[in-house]
Image (cartoon, rainbow, N blue to C red):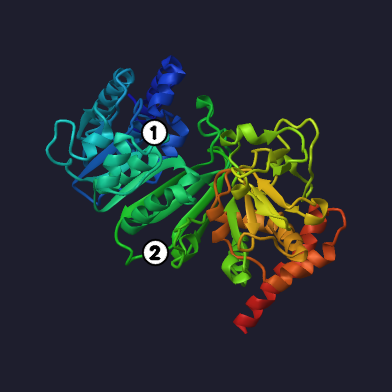
């Protein structure tokens, strides 16, 4: 006869086999249509381990976007082993009818295995659209009865502005740009006071302008208890061909009044021992940050990074600097683009022109145009002649740094105007260029290892938005100018020499500021 632990483990193992079989049978186009990424057993076990149960009595559990039921099975397995005293109601939602047979089998398995050890469990399969159901539609006149616990791996899919789901969620909760944020927002609405939510999602909601309304809504109603980052982009959902930095988090439905410390952990994948620490809430979500970025760092020595960043003396307005996305959108300006420069063109700068810290132009035989015709239609898209610093909006997964910057030095480009393509962000001064010393110093700072480590605390994807850059703090003008003056027109330094310059002129100054403040 099997003991309780063996019964629980068999439930998870059988569900994992169903997940793998269902995943293999699904057409990739159908999976993309529904945004399906089923949760492997080991990840499900970890997510379920973070769930908090009531002290006694009953527990109502919701699993929206349940797939083959992996999260539900992992949670029931834990209940069998740890809390056989609880009366359980498990509601699962899954829109894809092809997945329903496997999910139904998992639910039956949950009931039977729980019943074999005396755990009372009721299961409900909701087969419609979760967003409709959560909003009180889909044959219901009111929203469902609230839940004690939500456990979810929500579907990942961008939502168009005109989509029904996006409009429903905006009416009932907040603006969203992705289906996974829509599922989370509606799940929050279905939680009881002090209810608990555990989820695995992409890390992308932690920063950036697209998720700002969702962050504001979520952090207003929920308190983050635990944050775990899987750094590997390929391990967690490896059998689904997902390249995405994922985060597991748990949160409680409570007001902003009680902001307890947050446990943060980081591992490469689910086989690694995580690095864990406890951080004050104000370090993770800074109270005066209008963007409500979520800063995630699992290493104790990263506290020093947080302190260095907080002591940096300026934000862009205080430096007289601004950052904007390049104005030339190439697919809208095709008729004006030229492969090579001519008498009627100006330089058009793409990421491919960024080499070794400076802009190299033109690039003969490049896959992108080198120039754009200057005429009445295009001139308003240009910047005037001057020194600028540009940053790639998308860094490739192979690049060592999250931020990749280059200095555009005017003495190399005698043209009256410059076109910056939409795939770069441009640092400027009220639409004009920077002094050469500030431009070079800023280029060094942006390419530094210390800034790369700082920005990785809140940026979990390869896109660098202008908003991300505006939200950073920066060295003083004097510090930027000092570095730029030392560099001069010399070749761009290698990473070690660059970091030495930044340590000497910036990091040491911030450490000294901190020592003076303590004294």
Residue indicated by mark 2: 260
Q: Nearer the viewer, mark 2 or mark 1?
A: 1
Q: Quadrant of residue 331?
A: top right
Q: Quadrant of residue 9?
A: top left
Residue 237 x %, y %: 50, 31
Badge 2 crowding class, 10 Å Cα cut-off, few under 14, some 14 to 19, many 20 or more, is: some
Marks 2 and 1 sit apart, C-alpha to C-alpha, by: 30 Å
How many numbered dots are placed on residues in this image? 2
Whether residue 326 is visible here, answered yes or no, is: no
First in sequence, mark 2 or 1: give its number: 1
Q: Is residue 357 above or below residue 317?
A: above
Q: Quadrant of residue 387?
A: bottom right
Outermost residue, top direction? 25
Residues 76 and 322: in front is 322
Q: Is residue 113 above or below residue 384?
A: above
Residues 232 and 377: in front is 377
Q: Secondary structure at mark 1?
A: loop
Residues 86 and 68: in front is 68
The quadrant of the image that shows the N terminus is top left
Whether residue 214 is visible here, answered yes or no, is: yes
Outermost residue, right direction? 490
Residue 205 x %, y %: 45, 47
Q: Secondary structure at mark 2?
A: loop
- Disc marking residue 155: 1
Residue 170 x %, y %: 30, 46
Residue at 64% x, 59% y is 428
Badge 1 crowding class, 10 Å Cα cut-off, few under 14, some 14 to 19, many 20 or more, is: many
Residue at 38% x, 24% y is 15
- In the image, 169: left or right of 9? left
The quadrant of the image that shows the C terminus is bottom right
Residue 70 x %, y %: 37, 30
């Amino acid at each position: 006869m099997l003991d309780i632990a063996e019964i629980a483990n068999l439930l998870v193992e059988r569900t994992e086999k169903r997940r793998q079989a269902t995943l293999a049978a699904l057409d990739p186009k159908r999976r993309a249509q529904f945004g399906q990424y089923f949760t492997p057993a080991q990840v499900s076990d970890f997510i379920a381990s973070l769930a908090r149960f009531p002290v006694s009595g009953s527990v109502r559990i919701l699993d929206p976007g349940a797939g083959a039921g992996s999260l539900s099975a992992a949670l029931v397995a834990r209940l069998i082993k740890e809390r056989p005293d609880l009366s359980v109601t498990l509601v699962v939602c899954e829109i894809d009818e092809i997945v329903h047979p496997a999910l139904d089998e998992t639910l039956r398995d949950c009931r039977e295995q729980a019943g074999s050890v005396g755990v009372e469990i009721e299961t409900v399969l909701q087969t419609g659209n979760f967003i409709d159901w959560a909003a009180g539609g889909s044959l219901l006149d009111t929203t469902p009865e609230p839940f004690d616990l939500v456990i979810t791996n929500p579907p990942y899919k961008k939502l168009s502005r005109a989509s029904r789901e996006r409009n429903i969620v905006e009416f009932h909760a907040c603006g969203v740009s992705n289906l996974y944020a829509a599922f989370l927002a509606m799940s929050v609405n279905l939680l009881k006071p002090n209810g608990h939510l555990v989820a695995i999602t992409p890390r992308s909601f932690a920063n950036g302008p697209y998720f700002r309304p969702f962050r504001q809504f979520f952090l207003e109603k929920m308190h983050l208890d635990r944050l775990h980052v899987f750094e590997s982009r390929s391990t967690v959902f490896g059998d689904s061909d997902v390249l995405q930095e994922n985060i597991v988090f748990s949160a409680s439905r409570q007001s902003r009044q009680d902001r307890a410390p947050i446990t943060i952990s980081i591992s490469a994948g689910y086989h690694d021992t995580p690095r864990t620490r406890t951080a004050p809430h104000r370090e993770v979500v800074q109270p005066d940050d209008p963007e409500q970025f979520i800063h995630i760092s699992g290493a104790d020595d990263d506290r020093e990074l947080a302190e260095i960043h907080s002591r940096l003396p300026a934000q862009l307005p205080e430096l007289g600097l601004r950052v904007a996305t390049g104005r030339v959108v190439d697919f809208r300006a095709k008729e004006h683009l030229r492969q090579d420069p001519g008498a009627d063109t100006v330089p058009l700068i793409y990421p491919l022109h960024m080499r070794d810290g400076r802009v190299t132009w033109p690039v003969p035989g490049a896959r992108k145009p080198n120039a754009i015709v200057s005429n009445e239609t295009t001139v308003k898209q240009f910047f005037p002649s001057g020194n600028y610093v540009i940053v790639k909006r998308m860094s490739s997964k192979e690049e060592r740094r999250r931020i990749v910057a280059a200095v555009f030095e005017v003495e190399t480009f005698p043209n009256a105007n410059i076109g910056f393509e939409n795939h770069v962000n441009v640092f400027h001064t009220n639409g004009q260029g920077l002094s050469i010393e500030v431009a070079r110093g800023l280029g060094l700072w942006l390419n530094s290892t210390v800034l790369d480590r700082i920005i990785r605390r809140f940026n979990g994807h390869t896109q660098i938005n202008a908003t991300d850059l505006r939200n950073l703090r920066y060295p003083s003008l004097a510090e930027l100018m000092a570095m730029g003056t030392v560099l001069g027109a010399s070749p761009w330094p290698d990473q070690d020499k660059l970091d030495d310059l930044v340590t000497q002129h910036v990091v040491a100054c911030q450490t000294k500021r901190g020592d003076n403040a303590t004294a």
